[in-house]
Image: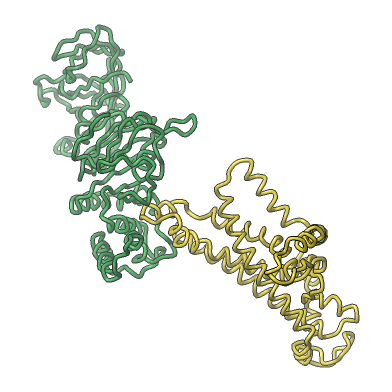
Chain colours: A yellow, B green
């Protein structure tokens, strides 16, 4: 049994371990390990294309994580007041949004946006007031990337924040109202601090998902290149230790963010259990 | 509309609360006097918490008026009412320390009092609940009893017209609960604020309150001082709920202004005082007799019993339970059936306790026999 478990973990993690190992390879070829070096990291960091892709990825991840956190939190709090059948429908819709394969979201978003642009662009051409300057042309790019990622990651934030908000003692809200706080005051002084770790965890997860996403980005990025897209296109020219270095860095960043998110979710649990005991 | 008396701080006038089909409060009429300690007592689901929440403003009446300090407050939200509540599980804010919890109400005021004043009032009210110097503690560092005191300080700092307490002692262990009962009572006398307490613990209600309001199924059954309720319960439900009692069913045989002759279903004939003059009983009207176990006097020799106007019967000891300050006997008499008696320890001085199967004499005063309506 123990051997079996070891075999499974080896199977799962050895490819990743190999990538990390070979990112430190002094030689050029993946096939022979010629010694330790960090020169590929330096190479990546001075590669303007990789850096531009990184900037795009970070911008998109940051923006979509912010949007997802804000709207996801609002949706989660709003949904608390919804009861009965309507609630079931909403709940199902949220879980479906999480489970739908990325490729479906990618294609669906692409088709929807292209169709919308087809109607909107001529309309803009027609009705754009001249004093506002040149007519903008809607296109795939940053906005469509951020939009698609927000849509996908917002469901995550809703699930996380809602479970935290549901676990919150309703009496705290009542106690705050009893002590003369207006509903708005109660939100900022009580509800928000209570659910803040969940919002932050949702933000970090959204950031990670958006940063790592290849499939959805591939469809809706237009002419933009995110880091995963850059890696994908360079790999077609052969796996270099440079790619391994990127992979290792992305891996470590993602892991760090996931651990941080987990920690935030656990931290609040510990605090509230301390009070109840 | 009924005019509530000048002194009443809270007044319910024909208040109903319905949740769909369920009636949580039905036709409540009650005046709470300023400065009194009133308890709502009843089993869970009797409507006592709903009543409290209607004063706090968390629930609104479906019908009728809730009057606070002479003002109708129907529809006024909780944050605009000059009352404060101590919640069942305290509902302290876990992300704030003790001082910030206590200061919370003051900080919502507009204009907000200067921080110097807030600080001094926080330490004042912490002193009041004997937690001086605990300002910087986290909530989870406090024991249950201390959390309770923080909750009290947090409410009292606002000098509310009424302090509402929702089963505040339920989460404490027995000994601590007793201590807190005494402390709450003293606190109430010191601050002079009206306290309204909700509890299902009759001992708690009786020991602390000036008046107790007994509720059942959304209705107020009887309101009175603890002594009134104990000595003169309106019906069997209250006699059963407040303290222990022996009940005997019977029918009225003869009724006069002062006395009632009653024949119990098991055969005994007894005469009881007609304490409620307003009750005139038809012949053969079914009634219940209640006799408190501590009103019974137990003795081996008839000569030891006071004789005047006392009823004396024989009984066999069926069971004996030692309860510390007194001994509880389960007794049997053919014409009464089984009943309980409490014998205080001083009766055992120079006299060994009664043994099981021993035949002894029981007596009680006519005034101890309560005649209750069938409810």
In the rendered image, the vertical position of residue A208 relative to residue A90, given as above or below = below
Q: Quadrant of the C terminus of chain B?
A: top left
> Would residue A3 be visible to someone looking at this image?
no
> Would residue B368 be visible to someone looking at this image?
yes
**Residue at 78% in and 88% down:** A47
Compare residues B39 and B110 and report the one nearer the observer: B110
Q: Quadrant of the N terminus of chain B?
A: top left
Q: Quadrant of residue B330?
A: top left
**Residue at 26% in and 20% down:** B372
**Residue at 66% in and 48% down:** A90
Q: Residue furthest front?
A: A130
- Across and down, in percent, residue B273 comes to 16, 18
In the rendered image, the vertical position of residue A201 relative to residue A83, given as above or below = below
- Across and down, in percent, residue A250 comes to 73, 77
Q: How many marks?
A: 0
- Across and down, in percent, residue B161 comes to 26, 49
Q: Quadrant of residue B29?
A: top left
Q: Quadrant of residue B134?
A: bottom left
Q: Residue furthest left?
A: B308
Image side of residue B323 versus residue B75, left or right: left
- Across and down, in percent, residue B199 comes to 33, 41
């Amino acid at each position: 049994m123990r051997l079996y478990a070891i075999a499974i973990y080896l199977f799962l993690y050895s490819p990743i371990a190999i990538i990390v190992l070979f990112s430190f390879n002094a030689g050029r070829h993946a096939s022979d390990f010629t010694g330790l070096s960090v020169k590929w990291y330096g190479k990546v960091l001075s590669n303007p294309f990789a850096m531009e892709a990184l900037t795009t990825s970070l911008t998109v991840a940051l923006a979509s994580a912010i949007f997802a956190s804000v709207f996801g939190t609002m949706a989660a709090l709003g949904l608390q007041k919804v009861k009965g059948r309507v609630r079931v429908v909403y709940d199902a819709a949220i879980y479906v949004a999480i489970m739908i394969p990325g490729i479906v979201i990618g294609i669906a978003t692409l088709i929807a946006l292209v169709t919308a642009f087809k109607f909107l662009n001529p309309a803009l051409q027609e009705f754009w007031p001249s004093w506002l300057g040149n007519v903008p042309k809607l296109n795939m790019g940053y906005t469509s990337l951020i939009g698609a990622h927000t849509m996908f990651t917002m469901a995550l934030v809703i699930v996380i924040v809602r479970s935290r908000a549901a676990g919150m003692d309703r009496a705290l809200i009542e106690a705050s109202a009893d002590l003369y706080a207006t509903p708005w005051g109660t939100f900022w002084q009580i509800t928000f601090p209570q659910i803040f770790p969940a919002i932050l965890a949702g933000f970090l997860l959204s950031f990670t998902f958006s940063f790592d996403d290849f499939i959805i980005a591939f469809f809706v990025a237009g002419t933009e290149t995110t880091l995963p897209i850059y890696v994908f296109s360079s790999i077609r020219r052969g796996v270099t230790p440079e790619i391994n270095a990127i992979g290792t860095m992305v891996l470590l960043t993602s892991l760090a963010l996931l651990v941080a998110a987990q920690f935030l979710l656990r931290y609040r649990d510990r605090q509230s259990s301390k009070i109840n005991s | 509309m009924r005019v509530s008396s000048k002194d009443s701080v809270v007044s319910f006038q024909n208040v109903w609360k319905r949740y769909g089909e369920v009636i949580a409060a039905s036709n409540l009429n009650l005046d709470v006097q300023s400065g009194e300690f009133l308890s709502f007592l009843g089993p869970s689901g009797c409507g006592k918490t709903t009543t409290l929440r209607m004063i706090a403003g968390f629930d609104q009446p479906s019908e009728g008026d809730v009057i606070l300090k002479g003002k109708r407050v129907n529809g006024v939200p909780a944050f605009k009412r000059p009352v404060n509540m101590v919640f069942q599980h305290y509902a302290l804010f876990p992300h704030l320390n003790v001082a910030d919890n206590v200061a919370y109400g003051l900080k919502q005021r507009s204009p907000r009092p200067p921080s110097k004043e807030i600080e001094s009032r926080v330490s004042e009210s912490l002193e009041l609940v004997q937690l001086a110097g605990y300002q910087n503690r986290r909530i989870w560092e406090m024991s249950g009893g201390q959390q309770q005191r923080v909750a009290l300080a947090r409410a009292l700092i606002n000098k509310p017209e009424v302090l509402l307490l929702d089963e505040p002692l339920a989460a404490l262990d027995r000994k601590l609960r007793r201590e807190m009962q005494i402390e709450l009572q003293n606190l109430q006398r010191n601050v002079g604020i009206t306290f309204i307490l909700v509890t299902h613990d009759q001992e708690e209600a009786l020991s602390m309150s000036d008046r107790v309001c007994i509720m059942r199924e959304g209705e107020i059954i009887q309101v009175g001082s603890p002594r009134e309720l104990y000595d003169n319960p309106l019906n069997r439900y209250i006699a059963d709920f407040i303290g222990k009692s022996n009940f005997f069913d019977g029918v009225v045989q003869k009724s006069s202004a002062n006395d009632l002759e009653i024949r119990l279903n098991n055969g005994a004939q007894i005469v009881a005082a007609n304490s409620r003059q307003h009750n005139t009983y038809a012949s053969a009207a079914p009634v219940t007799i209640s006799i408190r176990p501590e009103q019974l006097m137990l003795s081996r020799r008839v000569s030891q019993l006071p004789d005047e106007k006392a009823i004396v019967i024989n009984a066999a000891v069926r069971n004996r339970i030692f309860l510390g300050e007194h001994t509880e006997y389960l007794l049997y008499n053919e014409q009464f059936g089984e009943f309980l008696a409490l014998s205080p320890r001083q009766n055992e001085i120079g006299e060994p306790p009664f043994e099981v199967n021993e035949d002894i004499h029981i007596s009680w005063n006519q005034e101890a026999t309560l005649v209750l309506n069938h409810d």
